Amino acid sequence: MPVATINGSEVQVDDEGFLANPDQWNEELAEALASQIGINLTAEHWKAVRFLRDDFKQTGETPTIRRISAGTGIDIKTLFVLFPKKPAKKMAYIAGLPKPRGCV
Amino acid sequence: MNRLLILGGGTAGTTVANRLRKRLDPSAWKITVVDKDDNHVYQPGQLFIPFGTYRARDLVKPRRRFIGDGIDLVFGEVDRVDTDAARVFLTDDRELPYDYLVIATGATPRPDQTEGMVGNEFRKSIHEFYTYEGAVALADKLADWEGGRMVVHIVDMPIKCPVAPLEFTFLAEAFFAERGMRDRVEIVYATPLEGAFTKPVASKYLGAILEERKVTIEGDFATERVDPANKTLVSFDEREIPFDLLVTVPLNMGADYIARSGLGDDLNFVPVDRHTLLSKAHDNIFAIGDASDIPTSKAGSVAHFSVELFEDNFVNHAHGRPMTRPFDGHANCFIASGHGKGLLIDFNYDTEPLPGKYPLPGLGPFTLLRESEANYWGKMLFRWVYWNLLLPGKQLPFEPLMSMAGKETEEL
């Protein structure tokens, strides 16, 4: 398992840079992860990221974009503006959760 | 008397009913199957209707013919499940009490969930082949279509038979070529996935076939709406794809009664343990086939493989014993690729589709991830196997758990 140094602390990551252990996450780390993909976290970004963290705690799964939209009241179009191109993947990355499972 | 109630008499529900009837003592267990109608459709066949290969009588048979002796078949629409009272209410107020409930009501295409899809252009320039009526309407359209820009489109995953839109694309390309009009048709494949398929090795092999057939892939396309007036697909990040003929796979969802009963996720699929199919919320409810949220293909092969193991697990669970036969997510899908050929993929939760031979290493007769005529005949002959062996619950010569034998692993 590769180890990355983010914001001065060492964390385990998978091949694509997603945190391997969601428990190693904290809010400063989220800021650092976000800036690595060119996102500056505003209050609205945080609303989504906190939802992902809470939901993961309850279900053990990274939520889908539909679920995030329903749970936060942020419409999907806005999520695409906040986290451009691949919002589901980017939100999971910043929230320190596993990459959304590819559907098969 | 124990009451086992199975909602849905499709592939999974019918097979489970027939298999469990042989395992559960008739003097101690009553088994009831509920479905809304008596039409059992061989769903894999719908793919071939648009090209005139199959007709209705090939694909639809009475459900009752496949539900074995000693099983009650009730026709009715489920309104809701009351899990506290352990009762299912039908829309005509009939009540069906249960001790164990098996949810097998599958997944259904929902064009109403995408803005602009159902309207004046539906079944005119906007088509789908995931329903029998839709497939027939598309056959009529293709019979005298002059050509233009055809966009094959997936709204979102998961969908039933995730290879079907690829198969449709391959078959349509061959159909246009055989009619001498390939040069008058531009084909675009618009998908929410990055590439042709969900998993990297298969995506590479299948993507190469699309490229060879001159099909343009529009990947990472997250559909917001269809604009029927301008005949354009619009994504959440404001990409636009114009079409003359849209062949879409609408959003797939579980049944609405699952939402009304508080049993589903955001797409009405029932969260279950991926190895035992037991509901995460209720110890006397299982979800089998496409109705569950397990992370593998929604496909008849998955229903079939999982049911072989589920049968033992259910009997053990109902007798207070541990469930000892964990399901691995095994899926096995033939992919028609046009011109009388096909591919085969075989995979599970942990192993993605790989090239090789199946089921016998080196011999086949089927080839994995590469085109062959044997694969196409396997696909076409399976319809007989389905009606005559699979639904009655007879043993097929394929192992329920995936095997690595015959698979090539160097690309991993």
Image: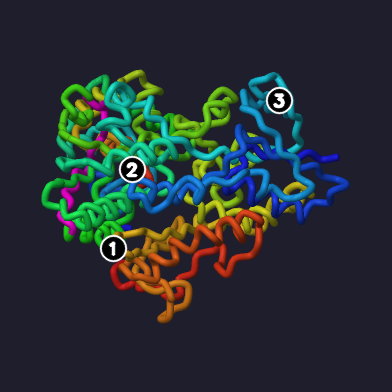
Residue appearing at x 31%, y 50% in the figure:
B168
Q: Which residues are magenta?
A: B213-227
To which chain does the residue with label 3 belong?
B
Q: Tag 3, which secondary structure?
A: loop
- B109 and B53: which is toward the camera: B53
- Label the magenta part by its dominant secondary structure: strand
**Which kind of residue does numbered mark 1 sit on?**
His
**Mark 2 falls on what kind of element?**
helix
Q: Secondary structure at mark 1?
A: loop
Rounded to the nearest angstrom, the CA distance separating label 2 from label 3 is 47 Å
Disc 1 marks which residue? B339
Residue at the spot 58% in from the left edge and 54% down from the top edge: B306
Q: In the image, B93: left or right of B265?
A: right
Query: What residue is shown at x 15% (from left), y 32% (from top)?
Result: B239
User: Disc 2 vs disc 3: Cβ atoms closer than 8 Å?
Assistant: no
Between tags 1 and 3, which lies in front?
A: 1
Please give the residue where the numbered disc 2 appears in the rendered image: B139
Percent position of residue A66, x then y: 37, 29
**Distance CA(mark 1)–CA(mark 3):** 55 Å
Label 1 to label 2: alpha-carbon separation: 18 Å
Query: What residue type is disc 2 on?
Result: Ala
Indicate which disc residue B84 carries.
3
User: Could you tell me the amino acid type at mark 3?
Assistant: Asp
- Horizontal relation, residue B99 to residue B255: left or right: right
Q: Position of residue B113 (x, y in %)?
A: 37, 26
Seen from the viewer's position, the closer of residues A88 and B295 is: B295
Q: Earlier in the sequence, mark 1 or mark 2?
A: 2
Q: Residue furthest front?
A: B144
For marks 1 and 2, give the one nearer the viewer: 2
**Residue placed at 63% from the left, 58% from the top?**
B308
